[in-house]
Image (spheres, rainbow, N blue to C red):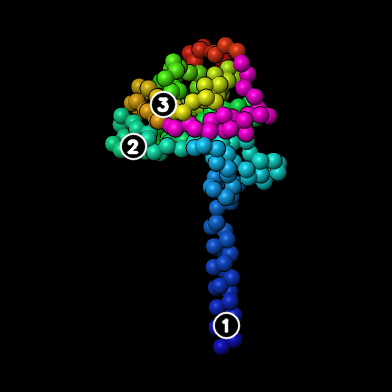
Amino acid sequence: MHKILLSGIAITALAAMTGACSTRDPSVFQNESNTVAAGNWRIERTPDRITGVPVPSAQLATLKASNSIAPDPKPASVQLTCFEGKPIVRFAFDFKIGSDANSILGYRFDDKPGHDNVPSRILLGYTVVVIEDGAAVAQFTQELASSKSLVVRIRSLNAGRTVADFETDGGKAAIDAVLTNCPAAAGPVRDKRAKR
């Protein structure tokens, strides 16, 4: 009887430890308990477990992302963040959007003039595109601050056309929260085709 009781306690302890191990660390994903709403944006407030400083990040999601090759609309997100001391605009999709060498990013806020061939880079995995050029980030965030909607388009020779629509209410608060200590540099926007 004593062995059965000990083995029951051991199984319960193992189950508790396994359950604790399978819980996601709150510092790696955003939810309502570790973010603050700003319009449609979610501003992250979780401190980084290494530095103890909150990660400068704001995300906006949509269910209105389509690709000419994918049969159904999928979710997508846009994120403002500071990476290695530089502001970044990051777009993530649930399908491949092309490769860096053969894709063009464009976007338009509200009824403002659109921007095509935006300096950008598609990351490995081919589902994420980032705007890293300081002047291009500055142009994007300047227009975001007073806008209500954003359409993003990626044209690719090998992954078709991707379009995502975002409702950007709260963009100014997201910019202020994320880029206050990581300002985007103004200046001429570099041509994507130009060598770095």
Q: Secondary structure at mark 1?
A: helix
Q: Nearer the viewer, mark 2 or mark 1?
A: 2
Residue 121 vs residue 40, the one in the foreground: 40
Which residue type carries mark 1?
Leu
Residue count near mark 1 (Cα–Cα under 10 Å), binned few <14, some 14–19, many ≥20:
few
Does residue 138 sit above or below 97 in this rendering? above
Report the disc number at residue 151: 3
The C terminus: image quadrant = top right
- Disc nearer the start of the sequence (3/1): 1
CA gap, disc 3 to disc 2?
14 Å
**Which of marks 2 and 3 precedes in the sequence?**
2
Which residue is the site of mark 2? 73
In the rendered image, residue 187, in percent from the top left (x then y), is placed at 60, 13
Residues under numbered marks 3 and 2 in contact, where contact means CB atoms less than 8 Å apart: no
Secondary-structure class at tag 2: loop
- Residue that label 1 marks: 5
* Residue 105 lies in the magenta-colored region: no
Res 185 quadrant in image: top right
User: Quadrant location of residue 18?
Assistant: bottom right
Residue projecting furthest to the left: 71
The residue that appears at 49% across and 15% down in the rendered structure is 192
- Specify the quadrant of the image occupied by residue 96: top left
Tell me which numbered mark, 2 or 1, is placed earlier along the sequence. 1
Quadrant location of the N terminus?
Answer: bottom right
Q: Categorize mark 3 by other alpha carbons within 10 Å: few (<14), some (14-19), many (20+).
A: some
Mark 2 and mark 1: span between their CA atoms?
53 Å
Picture residue at 54% right of the left edge, 62% below the top: 19
Instruction: Give the extent of the magenta segment.
Output: 166-186
